[in-house]
Image (cartoon, rainbow, N blue to C red):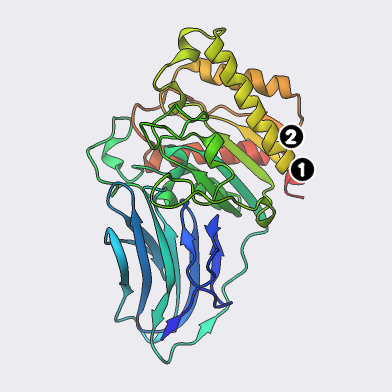
Amino acid sequence: MLIKPDNPLLQYSGRIDWTDKTAPVFVYPCSYIKIIFSGTRVAAVVENHKSYWSSYLGFFIDGEQKCVKLSDTGRETVLLADGLTDAEHELMLFKRMDSCHTFTFYGFEVDDSAVLREVEPKPERRIEVYGDSVSAGEVSEAVDCVGQPDPEHDGEYSNSYYSYTWMTARNLNAEIHDIAQGGAALLDGTGWFAGPDFVGMESIYDKIQYYPEPEKPSKWDFQLYRPHVVIVAIGQNDANPDNYMAEDYEGEKAQHWRKSYRDFIAKLRVIYPKATIILATTILEHDANWDKAIDEVCRELADERIHHFLYSNNGAGTPGHIRIPEAEKMSEELTAFIESLGEEIWE
């Protein structure tokens, strides 16, 4: 039996492309589908759209986390679990990776006799993140490389479930929309994403699909998700190809970045007039002048609901991506900071 995507007993979270209600497209990390069903097997019918790296889907079946590799292209039925006890089971299928791939979801195949039950409601608290590969959980599972450069990989170590962002959301019992893309800087023409004509967060933040190929960029309706807390974690990939903030803090390029960053935060404030906005980078090694620039902008904005947050080893923790233990520590620190702002931020 095929459970179609528009079945009301399926639960979704994330910035998802619902242009076709029978074929939603998953783009961003941490996006998920949940289903509770009875029976002995479950499979997902999907079509992958690969841009680079191998593509992996994550899922939890009855609390046990697993992943599956997708074909590069084409519609396929991916077996997630078979030989289950003939009882009730809970499944969460989630986007492990950023837009190195997207996938279209066509439904779940279950036993013909399967019965569905409504999933527990999503948390009332809501978080949104604008970030880069660290916020997406890229290479997070390479736990043998804590504090070290990345190993060679083809995407298999990336897992948004172990990003500090999703960990923080779980700590706070909050839903998350993770607008995070590996290599993204703030400004177009900088960073590492979608070169040689690099695409920055200024062109990503208001999109559902934003990768130049293979999908046409499409706008997001911000009324569909209203976060209480917005985390902006940009300012690391911005040093490529020119680390101007470190080399000439008062130079024209550095001043332009600070103005553009200030304008970006001001746009978010217009979109979310009541949200608490947290400005940050991460423990990934970078020059402290980028954090100095963010702090300067924060003070200039003089908004009591906009805060600048620094981790205990900010910008000095690792030359590689953030592994699971490092993400756990980051999430503990970020969680404590958010909790220190009081319960009223969730109202």
**Which is in the foreground here, disc 1 or disc 2?**
1
In the image, residue 188 sits, relative to residue 21, either above or below, namely: above
Q: Give the quadrant of residue 197.
A: top left
Label 1 secondary element: loop
Q: Which mark is residue 305?
A: 2
In the image, 212 versus 133, the foreground residue is 212
Horizontal and vertical percent position of residue 103: 40, 60
Label 2 secondary element: loop
- Amino acid at the residue labelled 2: Arg
- Amino acid at the residue labelled 1: Lys
**Quadrant location, the N terminus:** bottom left
Horizontal and vertical percent position of residue 340: 68, 37
In the image, 69 versus 126, the foreground residue is 69
Residue for point 46% across, 58% down? 26
Horizontal and vertical percent position of residue 63: 42, 66
Disc 1 to disc 2, how far (Cα)? 8 Å
CB-based contact (under 8 Å), mark 1 and mark 2: yes
In the image, residue 177 sits, relative to residue 151, either above or below, namely: below
In the image, 135 versus 64, the foreground residue is 135
Q: Horizontally, is 161 left or right of 120 in the view?
A: left
Q: Which mark is residue 274?
A: 1
Residue at the farthest left position: 152
Residue for point 24% across, 37% down? 151
User: Callout 1: 10 Å neighbours few (<14), some, many (20+)?
Assistant: some
User: Callout 2: 10 Å neighbours few (<14), some, many (20+)?
Assistant: some
The answer to whether residue 306 is visible is yes
In the image, residue 79 sits, relative to residue 100, either above or below, namely: below
Residue at the farthest front position: 216
